[in-house]
Image: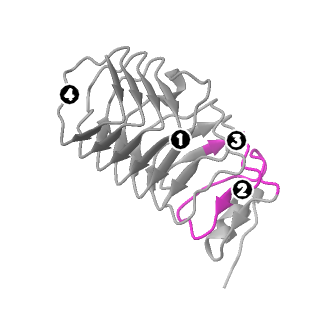
Amino acid sequence: MEYEDETFTRENFPKNLQGSSFLSVRFEGCDFSGLDLRKARFFQCAFSGCNWTTTKVQDVRLQEVHMVDSKCMGIDFTVVDPSFLQLSFEKSLLSGCNFSGLILKKSRFVECRVKECHFVETNLEESDFQKSTLTGTLFHHANLKKANFQEAKEYQINPLNNSLNKAKFSLPEAVGLLEGLGVMIQS
């Protein structure tokens, strides 16, 4: 099935949208939880207030996808089609998601709650985590060069095993970067 320049509002989709194509489509308040989206294509799509809990995303193409006030829980993004992958999240909840090994340059995770997600060997160069809360999120061997963590909270980033050249951080949270160096700060 192919959809172009449409808006779906509060849709409960059938359990199988495998191979469907969505071009410049808006989704508002839609529930994708548990859906099988294998090999679906989303190009220039916007999701607002949508639920992507345990959605199956094997070989899904996500190009210029923007999610606002949405929920992504338990999604293994490592199985999406990595070509042309471009994601933007704003004011969204991402919990238990795996972004390991992906190239996510210039991605946006702005004002999000990013809880217990994995960014292992992920290229996040010039990505934006501004004003996000990163509780229990793992950054390991990640490229965070020129990434923006200004006003972000609860991150634990070891500068010895992540690339942080020209990354931006704010005080007082930036003091936490010293933990990975074994530095103790006393007031």
Q: Is residue 141 magenta?
A: yes
The quarter of the displayed image where residue 139 is located:
top right
Query: What is the distance, in whole Å, between disc 2 and disc 4 at their CAs?
Result: 45 Å
Q: Residue most toward the bottom?
A: 187
Q: How many marks?
A: 4
Q: Categorize mark 1 by other alpha carbons within 10 Å: few (<14), some (14-19), many (20+).
A: some
Mark 2 or 3, closer to the camera? 3
Q: Earlier in the sequence, mark 3 or mark 1?
A: 1
Residue with the mark numbered 1: 87
Disc number for residue 13: 4
Is 34 situated left or right of 96 in this image?
A: left
Q: Residue most toward the front?
A: 5
Q: Classify mark 3: helix, strand or loop.
A: loop
Q: Categorize mark 4 by other alpha carbons within 10 Å: few (<14), some (14-19), many (20+).
A: few
Mark 2 or 4, closer to the camera? 4
Q: Earlier in the sequence, mark 2 or mark 1?
A: 1
Query: What is the distance, in whole Å, between disc 4 and disc 3 at their CAs?
Result: 35 Å
Mark 3 or 1, closer to the camera? 1
The kind of residue tagged 1 is: Leu
Query: What is the distance, in whole Å, between disc 1 and disc 4 at their CAs?
Result: 22 Å
Query: What is the distance, in whole Å, between disc 2 and disc 1 at their CAs?
Result: 29 Å
Q: Classify mark 1: helix, strand or loop.
A: strand
Disc number for residue 180: 2
Contact, CB < 8 Å: mark 2 with mark 4? Answer: no
Mark 4 or 3, closer to the camera? 4
